[in-house]
Image (cartoon, rainbow, N blue to C red):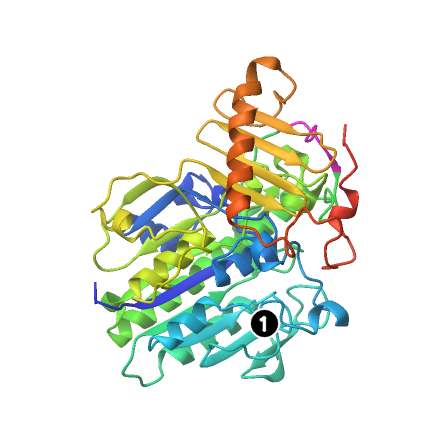
């Protein structure tokens, strides 16, 4: 691999880890993403810091957790008081750090950290998918081309990819960083390409378990059970295939330009999704209290580039803050003072020069909910009143049985609780903490106003 490779990140929206064939899905067709896995490295234990859009994206861009950067829920950008400011304005982003070290930087797609129509510092090229309403995938949508808003008709995937290809074709004598943010896997799941949807109307959706309803919460504010679940699943599966085709277009362009062997590619998602799993439709905010279900927190992460072993699987725990540091490491742009950054670089592990080891506990948060998940157990603390949850993921992978109140598990609970406390004692700004009595308004749903609800 070149000393400072080009960097491309695909960060999709609501694309769950379970919804890719390289992670075991038996019905989705995604040959280009399969190719990236077969010729690169698949991270088997990739997680999101927060199972909802805006805070997860903010963590990718800043390398910080929500209790550091202050974005704790999805931002209702169509509301002036929320969407009319850049919530990361006072944060140094990955793009700025790369630009400062000589990278030409480009943004194409979904921002969702506020003021999406305005180009952000750190980007030489800006093409954002920007809407004045919360609806996705309308026949006609608005896009911000270097800050000039234009209306276009067509699929987001194609329009965003066209912009990405136009950036790749620019003349340059420096390495580049290209971010491609597709939202196609985000609901509402309607009006996807019919030629793809028709394929999945014949599917049995055998990778979506027939679970009882999630027993530790009530239905939340995001998609309710649809009238026609198989049709929705067909639309979602088609979304993955639609994205896969666009990834193929980018790979073809890299080959045509002769820069494929100089480019490191990462494919990931902001967070996961339940598509009827646990009879839940959505991510962390699909229930009240908020959930940390495996389907909500697990994300795909594929890395592909020269110097990486083909078909490798790594089992170390990794999240967006680690990807942030890994990309900076490849660019020789690591911050001198890393004390405030919870992530670590996995460059040596990816290349095989370091054992497949690393963090053994993933810490997650969503407003007043905090989680510690090791290789067997998951502790979820729902502040201030609970109910708290403990699951044995080896014996109870579907998370049906809460062990929190059992005396046998109290030493384990205390160990995991201590790990949560130790993490946030180091990586938390008291003014931005998710445990503040009142958090800033992010949307009209105000998920944390329900923190006292105890489910059933």
Between 273 and 72, which is closer to the camera in this rendering?
72
**Circle count:** 1
Picture quarter containing residue 333?
bottom left
Picture quarter containing residue 45?
top left
The magenta segment: 211-218
Between 169 and 389, which is closer to the camera in this rendering?
389
Q: Residues within 10 Å of mark 1 (few under 14, many from 20)?
A: few
Residue 216 shown in magenta: yes
Residue at screen point 47% across, 42% down: 27
Residue 57 shown in magenta: no
- In the image, residue 437 lies at what x, y percent? 75, 48
Picture quarter containing residue 164?
bottom left
Residue at screen point 22% across, 46% down: 352
- In the image, residue 46 lies at what x, y percent? 44, 45
Residue 429 vertical position relative to residue 421 in the rendered view, above or below: below
The residue tagged with tag 1: helix, strand or loop? loop
Q: Which residue is mark 1?
A: 89
Between 207 and 45, which is closer to the camera in this rendering?
45
Q: Is residue 192 left or right of residue 437?
A: left
- In the image, residue 178 lies at what x, y percent? 41, 71
Decide if residue 1 is in sight here: yes
Residue at screen point 79% across, 57% down: 444
Quarter of the image where the N terminus is located: bottom left
Residue at screen point 49% across, 41% down: 18
């Amino acid at each position: 691999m070149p000393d400072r490779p080009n960097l491309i990140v695909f960060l999709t929206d609501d694309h769950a880890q379970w919804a890719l064939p390289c992670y075991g899905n038996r019905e989705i067709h995604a040959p280009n993403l399969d190719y990236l896995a077969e010729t690169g490295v698949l991270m088997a234990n990739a997680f999101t810091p927060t199972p909802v859009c805006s805070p997860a994206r903010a963590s990718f861009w800043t390398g910080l957790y929500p209790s550091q950067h202050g974005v704790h829920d999805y931002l209702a950008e169509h509301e002036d008081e929320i969407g009319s400011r850049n919530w990361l304005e006072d944060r140094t982003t990955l793009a700025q750090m790369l630009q400062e070290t000589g990278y030409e930087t480009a943004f194409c797609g979904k921002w969702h950290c506020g003021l999406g129509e305005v180009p952000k510092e750190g980007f030489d090229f800006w093409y954002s998918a920007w809407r004045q309403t919360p609806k996705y995938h309308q026949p006609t949508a608005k896009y911000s081309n270097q800050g000039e808003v234009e209306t276009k008709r067509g699929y987001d995937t194609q329009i965003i990819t066209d912009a990405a290809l136009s950036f790749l074709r620019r003349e340059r004598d420096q390495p580049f960083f290209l971010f491609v943010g597709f939202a196609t896997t985000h609901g509402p799941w309607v009006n996807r390409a019919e030629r793809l949807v028709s394929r999945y109307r014949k599917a049995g959706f055998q990778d979506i378990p027939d679970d009882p309803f999630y027993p530790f919460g009530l239905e939340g504010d995001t998609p309710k059970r649809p009238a026609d679940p198989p049709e929705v699943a067909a639309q979602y599966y088609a979304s993955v295939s639609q994205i896969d085709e666009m990834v193929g277009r980018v790979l073809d362009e890299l080959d045509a330009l002769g820069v494929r062997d100089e480019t490191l590619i990462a494919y990931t998602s902001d967070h996961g999704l339940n598509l009827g799993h646990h009879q839940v439709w959505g991510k962390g905010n699909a229930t009240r209290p908020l959930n940390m279900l495996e389907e909500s927190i697990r994300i795909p992460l594929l890395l592909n580039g020269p110097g990486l072993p083909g078909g490798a699987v790594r089992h170390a725990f990794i999240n967006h803050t680690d990807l942030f540091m890994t990309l900076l490491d490849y660019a020789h742009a690591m911050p001198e003072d890393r004390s405030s950054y919870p992530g670590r670089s996995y460059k040596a592990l990816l290349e095989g020069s370091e054992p497949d080891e690393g963090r053994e506990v993933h810490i997650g948060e969503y407003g007043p909910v905090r989680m510690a998940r090791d290789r067997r157990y998951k502790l979820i603390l729902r502040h201030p009143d609970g109910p708290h949850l403990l699951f044995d993921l080896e014996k109870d992978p579907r998370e049906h049985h809460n062990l929190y109140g059992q005396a046998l598990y109290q030493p384990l609970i205390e160990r995991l609780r201590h790990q949560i406390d130790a993490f946030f004692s180091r990586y938390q700004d008291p003014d931005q903490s998710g445990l503040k009595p009142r958090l800033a308004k992010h949307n009209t749903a105000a998920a944390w106003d329900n923190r006292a609800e105890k489910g059933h």
